[in-house]
Structures are given as C-alpha cells and as structure tokens.
Amino acid sequence: MSKQFDKVAATDPNSLPKTLEFPVMEAKMMETWAKNKTYVYDENSSKPVYAIDTPPPTVSGSLHLGHIFSYTQTDVIARYQRMNGKNVFYPMGWDDNGLPTERRVQNFFHIRCDANEPYVPGLDLPPILSVMSDKELQEKKIPQKNLSRKNFIEHCHKLTVEDEKLFKKLWSHIGLSVDWNLEYATIDDHSRKIAQLSFLDLHQKKEMYQLEAPCVWDVDFQTAVATAELEDREVPGAFHDIEFQVEGGGTFTIATTRPELLAACVGVTTHPDDARYQNLIGKKAIIPLFGLTVPIFGSEIVNPEKGTGILMVCTFGDQTDVQWWREQKLGMRQIIGKDGRLQHIEFKTSINQALAEENYAKIQGKNVKQAQKLVVEMLQAGNFLKGTPKPINHAVKFYEKGDRPVEILTTRQWFVKLVDKKDKLIKYGQQVKWHPEFMEARYRNWTENLSIDWCVSRQRFFGVSIPVWYPLNAQGVVEFEKAMIPSKEQLPIDPMSDVPEGYTEAQRGKAGGFIGEADVFDTWFTSSLTPQLGSHWELNPARHKKLFPMDLRPQAHEIIRTWAFYTIAKAMLHEEKIPWKHIAVSGWILDPDRKKMSKSKGNVVTPSQYLDEFGADAVRYWAGLARYGVDTAFDPGIMKIGRRLAMKIFNAGKFVLQNSAEAGSVTEPLDLAFLAKLKHQCIEASKSFEAFEPAQALMESEKFFWSHFTDSYLELVKTRTWGEKTSPEEARVKASAVHALRLAMGTFLRLFAPVLPYTTEEVWGYFNKGSVHHAPYPTAADFEGIASGEPLVFDAAMAAQAAINQQKTLSKVSIARPIAMLKMKAHPESAAFFKQAQFDVCGATKTEKLELVGDASLEKNQFIIEMCEYGPEPEKVR
C-alpha cells in the first residue's frame, strides 16, 4: 500500500476548497459510484463471496433514524469485507405486502377492499387528502370507498412503487453500498414464485397442513395472526367475582376479567389438590344468566393462588383454554365473531332456554366492551356478582400492529409444522454464530416455549397467494381435503384468477367445478426466504450453491422470534441447512425518554434534516459508534463530532498534499516510531471487525487519529516538512517525514472508509486514481519494507510536547510563542527515547535551546518543566 502514496496525484492543493461542501460532494460521489459500478456484485468473479441477507424494510410510510442506524451498521461490515478482497453480494429488497401496507393504502386513498365489488378497469383514485382535508373527512363522516379485490391490489402496487422510490433515494444518500441490480420486492413475480415453491416443497414433505382449529385472530384486520406477532400491553381491567351454582346443590365463586365470555364457558377447572374444591370435581356447574351445565374437572396447571383458585374454561379466552378444550374434549360455543362482535348461538341445552335467549339477545351484535358492561349489569341484577369489580392493570395480548386485543377463534387456516421440531430448531440455531452471543438465548427461549404450529394463512388481499384450488362436489360443497396443487412450471399463480388444469373459468364457484384459495401467506412466509430470494433457490442451482448459506444476517433483536426464527426454520425444513453463518443483532434507537423509536409510538425522528445539517458521513458516524445488541439514545451532538472528524480528515489530507517533495525511505526514529504504532492500530482494527465489533474499530482508530496523528505527529514534523531543503541531509529527513505522512494518510482514509465513505473517497481522489472502497483495508502488510520503529520514541515525544504546551497554557502565552531556554527532567529511559525525537519536539514547540536531565524518581513519560524562558511573541501576520 505504501507505494500508492509515493507520488502525489496531479491535484493542485491550491485548487481545493477551503472547506468541504457536503451536499456537493455527496451528489458527486453518488453519481460516480453509480457510473463506475463501484458496488456491483460480479457473478463471474473468482474472488471469495461475502453474501449479506439484507433486511427488506417494510414499505408502509417513511424511513426513520432507527432504520438509518441499523442499516448503516450493516453497510460498515459490507464495506470492510469489500476492502478485504471479497466479492460482496449485498442486495436491497422491499417488504411491500402485508397488513401494514394495506392499512397505509386504505388511509392514503380512503378505500377498503370488498371481494364482492366488481372490477373497474383503469380505476385510478387520487390520494384522499389531495381532494379533501382530514377535518372534512371527520366532519362529513365520509365512509371508505369499496373497491374490488383486483382494484385494491392495483392501488397497493401504485403506492408501494412510489414509496420505494423515496426509500431508494434516502438509502443512496446515506451511502449504502448495496448493488441496486439485485433489488427485489416481496410481492414481485420472482418472490411470489420462490414463496410458492416453498409451499409446494413443504406440502410435498407433509410439513404443511390446513385445519379448522382455534387460532389467534385480529378483529380489526379480520385475519389470523401468528403467536410470534403478538405483544403484551398493559391495559386496565377488573376482576369480577361471579357466583356459579353446582348441579345438585352448592355454589362457588370464580374471579374473571372477562365476564362477557360467560355464554362461551364450556367447563370449569381447579387444581386437583385444592381442598376447597376437591368435592366439585366430576360434578357439573350451572352458568349464571344462561343456565348451561358444564363439567368441573381437575388440572395441575391451575394456580390455586390466582383469583379464587377455580376458573372458567371458555371457547376461547386464551391458549390455556384451547389446551383444556382439546384434552377434555369439551363442547364448542364460539360467541365472538370475526368482526369482534357477539354472534348468534343456540341455547337448546339450557335448563331455562327462554331466559338464556332473552339474556343473550341483549348482548348479541355488541362488541366485547359493550357486551361486558351489559353482562355485569345483568349479573348485578340477578345477584350473581359478589361485591364490586376490583380494578387491575394486566397484560393483554395484542397483534403488534393492532389496536384491540386479539381473540382466539376457530377458523380454517394453513399451518407449518414446527412444534414437533423444537429440539432440532434449537440445534440449528446453535450452529449460527450470534453477535452478541447472548442473543442466541432469546431465540432458544422462544423456541422452547413454542406451543402451536406456525399459522401462515391470512385473510387479506395484498400478499402472495396460497397456490391451491379446491373442487366443489355435485352439491357445491367445498372439498378442502382434496386440495389441488399446481406444478412448479405453473408458478407464480393467483388461484383467484388462474384456473387449475382440467377446468375452465366458467366452472369457478359452480357445483362440480372449483374455487380458488382466497387467503394469502403471512408476510413472514415470504420474508423468511430472503436468503433464497437472493440465491434464486430452486431456479438457479449454481447461484444458490455459491451464495447459500449466506455469510451474514443483520437484524433487530425484537424480531428474533419472527424473522430469525422463521428463516432458520425454512432453511432447516427445505435443505437441512442453516441460512447464514453469522447473525448480527442491532439494538434500538431510543428517544430522550429512553423509549424505543417507532412509527407506532409516534416518537420517530426523520433523517432528512440531519443529513442536510450534518452530512451523511456524520449521521453514519453516529450509527457506527453503536455496538451490536446495545440500545442507543438519539444524540445529534454525536453527529456534530462526526462532522468535525470528516472536516479534520479533509484538512489533514490537504496538509499532506501540500508537501510536494518526493517521498524517500523512512529513516528517522520519530517517523518509524509513529508508523510502528499505526501498524499496531491497523492490526487491532481488523481484529475488531473480524469479531463483529466495528464500533470498537472506529473508536480506537478515531482516538489514534486525533491524539497521535493530527494533534501530535502532524505538528511534530511540520518543521522538517516546511519549505525547500537545500542540504542533502535536510532533504533526506524531509523525505522520510513525507513518506510517513503519505503512508499514514492513506492508511487513515482506508481505516475510516467503511464509516465515512464520502469524505474518504473525496480525499483519496486527491492522491490516487480509483476508489478507496476498492483499496485493501490496512493490515501489517502495508508496512513491509519499513524498518521496525520503537514506539516508545513516539510516546516520549508526545509526552514532552504535551508538557511544554501545558506550560505555555499555565503561563498564559500563545502556543506559537518561542521558548528561548527550557530545562526539563524526565525518567532516564524516557529521556533517552526523547533524544531521538528532540529536533522535532523543539521545532513543534518553538524551543530554541533545551536541557534535559534524567531523574529515576519520575514515572516513565513524565516530563517536568523546571525552567522556561520565553522569547518575544511573534509578530501577527496582517
């Protein structure tokens, strides 16, 4: 590497701007990188491949600083690996299907999908807010316009395409070195085909099944959701003590937070060793208000300390209800409908059918909150409620993007078998190297507690279609057990518009004909295939073999249970492999209140203003200082420091460029000492990167740059490098410094290039042709052919320089004021090393005469000023 800076490029130092114009520089570099294909993955290269499984951001609004934070961390790794001689496979995808996109489209156009609406060719609606304000919408209570499924999907595509353009512009501005030729979207034909190939493979292996069974349901989105997509939220509630009667005589009290589920109660359970209720086991309880009789049974998973120690089993209140319902083969009374309102049920088995129907009529059609209020009033009127409800705050399950608690409803869904493979999934997770290592425990804990299979079907519209048709028998009844699966060659398909072999479109929905599967895949079903989407699994075996398993998966820690888990599961199920060798888990960006920054919380900060104010490199610097797995508070002050670093690199580059003499051999002890320390820093920086600690590499390199290079070495060698040198000896020592300066500058530019790509590329161009991002990351090999220096020489020089400058500060004189006579003492070893750099220290501190004596009582590198006699202040240059 040192030879690259032996001769200065043709750049005239006087032609350079006084300061960096970041917008101008960034625009120039973005254009240059695109033109030169700087970051293109070469399919035919013989270089070793480094493949990154890039997170496809959800296209449902705007990017925020949390995105910039995590994606920059990934880009730093990508740039380091590229400089390490790797052929970097670095794609960018868009996760543009699913519930968040549908919600954004609904709000943007003020529309909703209605499968019964006819298709309107060429329908192109404007954004609602372009023709009507929010206030007008609220005042006039204008309902959303119903669109056919096909029209709705067309508008989803329309909006996501525009969102993706804005995302791409921002990603380019922040300097992500992705190969845009590898761009994909999870709803494009390629992704749809891979996802449907995944379905075919799993179905053939009998790892997928459909079943009418209890599943988690979001009543607002009106779709099934996976347990991995749930989150607990603290909400207010109340315990209601309700008195139940026992068939044959007696009573007991149940404390419940959901009295509205009384009509759904199909059993009562208690711990078999609970002496209070042992005599009830085997008997039947009578449900108040509705006169239904249900069995009382014992279960060891009941907590006797919770509530009254005896509880309702409903269809369904939670997953434990599902477990008891299956184990005890209880009845089914699903009172909550898909819309979250109480639906009609029969009361033929009630001991008082007329009263039961009368009571239920009061709550039928109501939502959960309304029904709960009415049931409590009826319980009070019938003297079934003991005392007053006791207010509590408790954790309730919500779909992570939902507004109301989820319910558990019985519906027909598609599932992937995972519960029976928990041990195997844990072993595969252990084969991946986690950074930081403790994050693997989150994956393991989630897997160990898995209780139901992965529900992958969604009752939505904008998603990858489940590629299945069902025949209708002669009576027009759907024969779900005879699902018709397309061939690989037919994919991708939409069963709602494509026709199975042997049928015509005229037979759709007719007796003896067929229907298409209306459900789409959960978005994670496709997103869990991001490595395969990039490698072209099943489509290009040679490419897949070259790229899979990938080298790195970067992601956030809150989606370990979804994205990491499902991706590992898919790779295991399809090929019995891990999807990647390493996973690097980023932390969250926190707002000033230490809360996670997210769009749903309304506390996000958009990056544009900070990119404009500080420049992309400064924003990247802020992100680059964060360690993996550690939450980081948003702090614009760090960006200011990053901007200052970029400016200092620019100014240091100009200083080195101004030294126009030919570089010679490095011979002077100070130069050799400095390069020895710089060599060590390069070795340590590489170690940090290889250990997935790029923040450590940045911090240590920056510290070295300021303390050893700009504040010390540059100042120390100025006397040797200034002006023309007439004698051979002066020319020789100047050439030694010039060589060291150029080698150091080239080294620092490469050390900082992964984090500060714009500034380093700009300054690199003053000295070299080509891109710094194709130059090798600095290693010990860069210093071959240079004599081994003694680092302690530089330490002594730095310490002496600092002591002299501190003395000037204490004396309240300028740093530029000459010193006529200086007497110092130091440890004898430090004094001996200092002698080898005395000329440079005296030149940097304007010391004309110096006397130094050894004192063994002092610590090493401790320099004490005993006498300092100043010369006259230099005349100010006007």
Image (cartoon, rainbow, N blue to C red):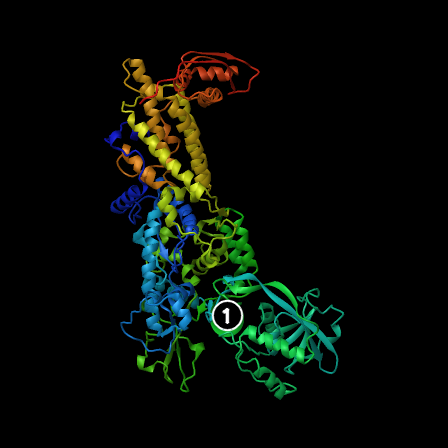
The picture places residue 853, in percent across and down from the top left corner, at 50, 11
Q: Amino acid at mark 1?
A: Trp
The picture places residue 819, in percent across and down from the top left corner, at 42, 15
The picture places residue 570, in percent across and down from the top left corner, at 44, 60
Q: Residue at x 33, y 55 (%)?
A: 166
Q: Residue at x 38, y 45 (%)?
A: 78
Q: Residue at x 36, y 84 (%)?
A: 510
Under circle 1, the secondary element is: strand
- Report the front residue among 43 and 620: 620
In-image side of 331 versus 649 (left or right): right
Q: Which residue is farthest left?
A: 10
Q: Which image quadrant for residue 352?
A: bottom right
Name the quadrant of the C terminus: top left
- Report the front residue among 315 and 760: 760
The picture places residue 89, in percent across and down from the top left corner, at 35, 49
- Report the front residue among 730 and 360: 360
In-image side of 207 versus 356 (left or right): left
Q: Which residue is farthest bottom?
A: 354
Q: Residue at x 42, y 63 (%)?
A: 100
Name the quadrant of the N terminus: top left
The residue at which mark 1 appears reads as 217
- Residue 139 visible: yes
